[in-house]
Image (cartoon, helix red, strand yellow):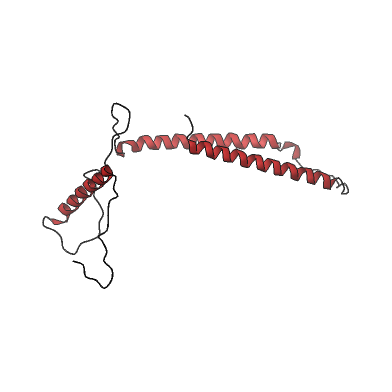
């Protein structure tokens, strides 16, 4: 799968950062080498079982093997989770040219949470919630199709003036 332009930019920035760190470390190592040659030699000592410890190369390789296994496991988990959730996602229908058709942002039967009202309209609260969800879905779909933002709050009037 090809990378997106944002991914390519992120990878390029990462590579440049890594190169800068390597250059800085190289300079630091050279400085330490130069400085330590002027110091007296430190006494050597041995650490018990040091020969059984892995070397730096083996440690890095082992850490990356573990990271690869964890990443593969996480990818499988995410893919399995996506498979399980797919039936709950809205269906995207593609036309013959392969461009996605516009989709509704809310299903007709999805209830919308709204602020409690002081008096219930005729038909009871269940009927009111159903009507509210249907009209909200239609408003959202209509606004999305026209390319205009949906307004969620009434116009406010400045303090001290009466609304007409």
Q: Which residue is drawn at 19% across and 64% down?
A: 118
Label total for image: 0
Quadrant of the image occupied by residue 117: bottom left
Q: In this view, does 11 lie to the left or right of 137?
A: right
Q: Residue at x 23, y 46 (%)?
A: 137
> Residue 42's spot in the image, x, y percent?
85, 47
> Residue 70's spot in the image, x, y percent?
52, 37
Pick the front one: 164 or 45: 164
Pick the front one: 81 or 40: 40
Pick the front one: 125 or 50: 125
> Residue 9's spot in the image, x, y percent?
53, 38
Q: In this view, does 162 lie to the left or right of 60?
A: left
Q: Is residue 53 left or right of residue 144?
A: right
Q: Which residue is drawn at 29% across and 38% down?
A: 90
Q: Where is the C terminus found, in terms of image quarters? A: bottom left
Pick the front one: 85 or 6: 6
Q: Which residue lies furthest to the bottom in this view?
A: 160
Q: Residue furthest left?
A: 122
> Residue 94's spot in the image, x, y percent?
30, 30
Q: Is residue 35 left or right of residue 60?
A: right
């Amino acid at each position: 799968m090809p990378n997106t332009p944002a991914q390519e930019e992120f990878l390029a920035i990462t590579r440049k950062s890594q190169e800068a760190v390597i250059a800085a470390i190289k300079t630091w190592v050279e400085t330490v080498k130069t400085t330590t040659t002027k110091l007296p030699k430190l006494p050597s000592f041995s650490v018990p079982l040091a020969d059984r410890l892995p070397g730096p190369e083996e440690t890095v390789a082992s850490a990356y093997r573990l990271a690869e296994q964890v990443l593969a496991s996480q990818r499988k988990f995410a893919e399995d989770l996506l498979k399980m959730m797919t039936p709950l996602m809205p269906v995207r229908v593609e036309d013959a040219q392969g461009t996605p058709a516009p989709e509704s942002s809310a299903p007709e039967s999805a209830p919308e949470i709204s602020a409690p009202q002081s008096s219930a309209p005729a038909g009871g609260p269940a009927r009111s919630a159903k009507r509210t969800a249907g009209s909200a879905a239609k408003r959202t779909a209509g606004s999305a199709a026209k390319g205009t933002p949906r307004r969620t709050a009434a116009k406010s009037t400045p303090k001290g003036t009466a609304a007409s």
